[in-house]
Every structure is written in C-alpha cells, then in structure tokens.
C-alpha cells in the first residue's frame, strides 16, 4: 500500500476486506471466528502479525488467537497465547494511547504505560529512520465493542508491511474490519451460548425423561400401594393414578379406583382422620374398603408435590398394608386385658370398664330438680352400651385360632379394648360422650337383706335401676385343686367361666378377678332383677361337671353391690365382696381367715 492515494489500491483493499469479512461470517465457532479475525488482519490489511485478546467472564482479557505472516525464529507472538492481562491495566493502556478514531496508537516512547501483566511481544524489525517509520515497540490497537457498548476484546496489529505508520485509508479499513470483527465475535458468542443452552436443555430433558421413567417404574412396580390424588379443580380428591399393588390390596381394578377417592373407600369411623391427613403432608392409620365388603387396615403417608411456580400440584400417597401389625396389636391388647386361662376380662380390664361408668360427682336431689344440661330425667340409669359382650365361646375361639379374633369381622375392631390403662380412681366423663350417671337403686324392701347394697345417704338420688356388681367366690374349689391337681382346677375354672358367660345378658361383663373369684357387671337392672340374675348364676354353676372322666361339683357364694357416681372402683368392689361374705356366713359356709387369700394360682 505504498500509494494509498491511488484509486486502484483502495479498490483492491476493499475487495480484500470484503473477502476477509466473508471469512469472518463463515466461521462455525467462536474459536474459528477469532482465528479468522487475526488472519484477516494479516492477509487483508497488510500487517505482519495480529493478536486478539478476548474479555473473559471475570472481566480480564486473555490472548485467544494470534497470527504471523512468517513465523519468527524466536517463536513470534504465538508465545502470547493463553496469557492474561487485567482489565484495569488494559483500560489504562487504552486511555494513555493516541486516539485515531476508534483505534488506539501507542508510540514506542510511551511504552511505560504497558503494565507488566499485559501480554506483549516486540519483534526484531528495523529501527525507524524517519518520523513516520514504524518502530518495533509501536502498538496499534482496535478495541471491539458489542452493540450495547460492552468491550468484547482488543485486536492488536504489528509491523505494517509498508514499514510506515498506517495512513488514513488503512486506519479506516482497520476500523471497518474491527467493527465487522466485533459483530462476528458477538454472533459467535451468541451461537456458542445458544449451543450450550441447547445442550443443557437437551441434557435436562434427558434427565427429566429419565426421572419420569424412574418415577413411573418406582410408582408402578412398588411393592406397596401408591396413588396420586388431584388437589385442585372439579376432580379434587379423585384418584388419578394408582399402581397394581394398590389394586391387589383392595381387590379393585384400576379403572374402578380411578373413578373414586379415598373418601369413598374409607371406613365411616375414620373419615374425620382422613380429612385431617389429606389436607397436609402426614400419615394416618385407617381402614379402606375391599371389594369383598371387608375393610383393610392401611397406613397412608402423604407427600404434597409442588410446582415452583404454581404451588401444590397433587398429592402422592403411599399405602402400606398394616393388617398383620394391627392383628398383632389386637392380640397383645387382648392378652394384656384378658385372663389367659378363661379368656374373660381380667381385673385391670374390669376396673377400667367400671371406672369409665363412674364419675366424681354423685347425682343429688337438687341436681335432678334443676335438670342440669345432660342430666335430669335422662340421667337416670339406662342400659350402658359401653360394655362388650364377653362370652366364653368367643374367647375360647379366639385362643383356638392362634390369636385370630373372629369378632373382628369386616370392621375388625382392632386396638386395645376400650378403657385399658384408664385410671382406677375417679375418671370423669370427659372424652366418653354425654355421660349417663350411675345411681344406686332404691331399696323398697323392709330393712334390706344380704342382696341389697346400702342406701346412699347425703342427698344422693336413688333410682329403680342401676349398675349391679355381682361378686362370685367358688365354694369347694380348693379341695378339687388340692385333690386332683392344678390341671383339673384349671378345667373347672374354664367350665365355670363358660357357664357364667351363658347365664348373663347380652351387654353384661363377666370377668375373672383372680383365683376362684369372678365378677359380673350388669347395668340397667333393678334389685329384684339382680336377685334373679344371682340365682341364675348360682344355678348355672352348681350342676356337676365332668372333668377328665370324673364328676366334680363346686358351689358359689354371691354378693351384690351397687355402683354409683361418686364412688371409686375399689369401694364398689369392696362393697360387693363384703356382701359375698355376708351371704357366705348367712348360709353357714366356711369363711377364709385372711382377706384376699387365693386358693388357686392366678392366670393372667
């Protein structure tokens, strides 16, 4: 370009510039674009060497591409590749350089402005003779900016082949080239970012598909039941997806379950628990109906699956079969509250049932006259539905079926029997619904007898019906036990338990207090009915029984006490026990010398 003023030189330069710009746009990657920039500056603009320092994400500039027309013996500017200069040093260098339009020229005598961390290579070209000659330490820089004005990098060119400092035309050409280079670099970066974004998106989609497939397999092939429930819209609460394990557990096809909700399947007694659990992440043990009409005990564990933008989306429910565990719990509760030999409720269960029937406050005459809420006429003794019918046959069947309780049926009735573990003192009515007062029946007979409990004084009300407590002590049992052994004694106790259970009414409780003592709770009966019940119990026990081929017979002493609110369980049982001893003495029977002495070992 010795004759830059001549038109044909300018035309040739424009043609060359057009070609190298086309090469910039043809590059397929950022690295290819940077290499096209340095090669275009050397081959298209008449410089022997060029380098591009690219701005990194941290702001510093790194030498990303170099090109030299002829490789120097000492390695040339290629040794600069990968070297980094700080943004602060570059900004100071660009600031102290001469401004040639958008270009920056740093003359050799201003080399002090080049900080030590800026990559620099000085060739071995000739020293200048004239003022316009190029000095080996001169530098010409073309900053490249994005459309938003951000610095993308710096194009450095060195050693013009003319040996002169570039003239106006070369500077303008370099300015145009650097502008096109900045556009090409920006586009290349954009393409690279798009490619990385597409690669990330594809990777995320693959991970999502893999995650969905993993979830599908974990959901479908889980050994326990799984269900997905809608949380919003018209289908709120409906099962939208179930797995095969849940279908097998409930004996229902998938198509049927997807038309139902857990509210349609839950046992009526567990509906409130389900509603509380369905509103949040949590767990609940409840019963779901099976296709055969029975109920299955399950443990529901809920997890709310939420979307980051839209919030909770659906409810994922894990349905675990706990039928066996509940059955074992029933067995343990039954063993804890029932006598192992006879299957009857034991002393603890007897006191718990009796304690649930009594409260701290006796029903007084003033309370009846005022008809307080929940009392008044409705507070007089009514048949109490809180007791479970305890028949001998049911208990022996329970023990004979290896712990399987035939009374459980479809509704199961699992869990510890009601009141087990309740205090034996004065439990109040709270938690047991509307309390019905237990009142000692009035004694209309002259003077009373051994069948009559004491009249409640102090203003307490007497009624026609109440809660009778019949204390039974076997007569002659000790001789059987001593003569024939404990096995024969056990058999006698089992037979007595069977006979007592058959003689009482439905809803009455027969319990073994220990040894040869039994207690019957009969609610809602009068004094005459209690006498009749005592006679039935006596007549049921005294007939001979056949044990191991031998005929054996025992008698029974009976005492009837009455339970009323304001009394403790110990007081009620002690009163019935005293009545039993009064009856035993009245008949002239033998009375044990020590209170509480047992003639037979306890079982349970």
Image (cartoon, rainbow, N blue to C red):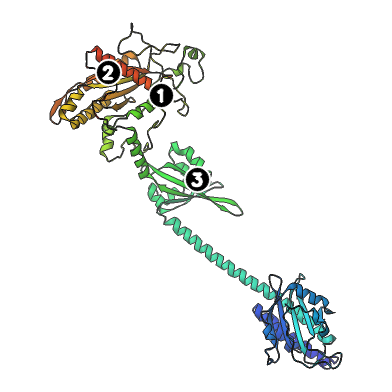
**Which tag is nearer the camera, tag 1 or tag 2?**
2
| Label 1 packing within 10 angstroms: few (<14), some (14-19), many (20+) | many
- In the visual, does 520 lie left or right of 254? left
Separation of marks 3 and 2 at Cα, in angstroms: 53 Å
- Extreme residue in the front direction: 594
Tell me the distance, in whole angstroms, between the alpha carbons under discs 3 and 1. Answer: 35 Å
CA–CA distance in space, label 1 to label 2: 22 Å
**Residue on which disc 2 sits:** 558
Look at the picture and state if 316 lies above or below 492.
below
- Residue designated by label 3: 282
Q: Is residue 299 above or below residue 35?
A: above
Q: Residues within 10 Å of mark 3 (few under 14, many from 20)?
A: some
Place of residue 298 in the rendered image (x, y in percent of width and height, measured from the top left): 41, 45
Q: Quadrant of the N terminus?
A: bottom right
Q: Position of residue 313 (x, y in %)?
A: 56, 51
Q: Which corner quadrant holds the C terminus?
A: top left
- Who's the residue at 38% across and 14% down the image? 441
Q: Which of the two labelled residues, at mark 1 and mark 2, occupies the earlier sequence position?
A: 1
Residue 306 visible from this viewpoint: yes
* Residue depicted at x 40% and y 21%: 568
């Amino acid at each position: 370009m010795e004759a830059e003023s001549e038109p044909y030189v300018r035309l040739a330069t424009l043609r060359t510039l057009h070609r190298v710009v086309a090469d910039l746009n043809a590059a397929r990657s950022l690295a290819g674009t940077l290499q096209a920039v340095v090669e275009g500056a050397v081959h298209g603009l008449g410089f022997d060497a060029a380098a591009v320092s690219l701005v990194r994400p941290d702001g510093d500039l790194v030498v990303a591409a170099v090109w030299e027309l002829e490789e120097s013996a000492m390695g040339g500017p290629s040794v600069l590749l990968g070297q980094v200069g700080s943004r602060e040093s570059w900004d100071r260098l660009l600031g102290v350089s001469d401004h040639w339009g958008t270009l920056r020229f740093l003359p050799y005598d201003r080399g002090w402005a080049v900080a030590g961390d800026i990559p620099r290579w000085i060739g071995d070209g000739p020293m200048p003779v004239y003022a316009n000659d190029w000095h080996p330490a001169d530098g010409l820089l073309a900053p490249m900016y994005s459309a938003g004005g951000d610095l993308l990098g710096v194009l450095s060119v060195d050693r013009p082949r003319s040996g002169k400092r570039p003239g106006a035309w070369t500077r303008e050409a370099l300015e145009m080239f650097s502008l096109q280079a900045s556009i090409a670099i920006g586009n290349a970066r954009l393409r690279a970012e798009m490619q990385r974004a597409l690669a990330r998106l594809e990777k995320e989609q693959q991970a999502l598909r893999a995650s969905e497939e993993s979830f599908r397999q974990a959901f479908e092939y889980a050994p326990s039941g799984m269900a997905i429930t809608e949380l919003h819209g018209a289908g709120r609460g409906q099962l939208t997806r179930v797995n095969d394990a849940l279908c097998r557990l409930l004996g229902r096809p998938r198509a049927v379950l997807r038309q139902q909700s857990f509210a349609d399947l839950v046992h009526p007694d567990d509906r409130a628990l389900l509603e509380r659990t369905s509103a949040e992440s949590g767990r609940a043990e409840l019963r779901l109906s099976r296709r055969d009409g029975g109920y299955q005990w399950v443990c529901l564990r809920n997890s709310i699956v939420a979307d980051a933008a839209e919030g909770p989306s659906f409810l994922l429910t894990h349905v675990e079969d706990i039928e066996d565990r509940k059955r074992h719990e029933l067995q343990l509760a039954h063993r804890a509250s029932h006598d192992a030999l006879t299957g009857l409720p034991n002393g603890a269960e007897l006191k718990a049932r009796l304690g649930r029937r009594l409260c701290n406050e006796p029903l007084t005459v003033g309370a009846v006259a005022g008809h307080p809420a929940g009392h008044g006429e409705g507070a007089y003794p009514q048949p109490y539905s809180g007791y479970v019918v305890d028949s001998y046959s049911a208990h022996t069947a329970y023990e004979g079926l290896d712990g399987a309780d035939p009374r459980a049926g479809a509704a199961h009735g699992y869990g510890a029997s009601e009141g087990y573990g309740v205090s034996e003192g004065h439990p109040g009515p709270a938690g047991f619904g509307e309390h019905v007062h237990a009142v000692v029946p009035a004694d209309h007979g002259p003077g009373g007898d051994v069948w009559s409990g004491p009249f409640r004084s102090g203003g307490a009300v007497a009624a026609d019906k109440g809660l009778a407590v019949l204390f039974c002590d076997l007569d002659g049992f000790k001789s059987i036990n001593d003569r024939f052994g404990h096995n024969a004694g056990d058999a006698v106790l089992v037979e007595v338990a069977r006979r007592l259970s058959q003689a009482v009414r439905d809803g009455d409780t027969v319990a073994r207090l220990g040894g040869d003592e039994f207690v019957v709770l009969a609610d809602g009966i009068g004094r005459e009915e209690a006498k009749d019940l005592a006679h039935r119990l006596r007549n049921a026990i005294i007939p001979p029984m056949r044990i191991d081929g031998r005929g054996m017979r025992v008698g029974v002493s009976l005492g009837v006490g009455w339970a009323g609110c304001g009394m403790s369980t110990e007081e009620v049982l002690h009163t019935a026990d005293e009545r039993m001893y009064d009856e035993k003495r009245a008949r002239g029977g033998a009375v044990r010398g020590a209170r509480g002495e047992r003639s037979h070992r306890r079982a349970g």
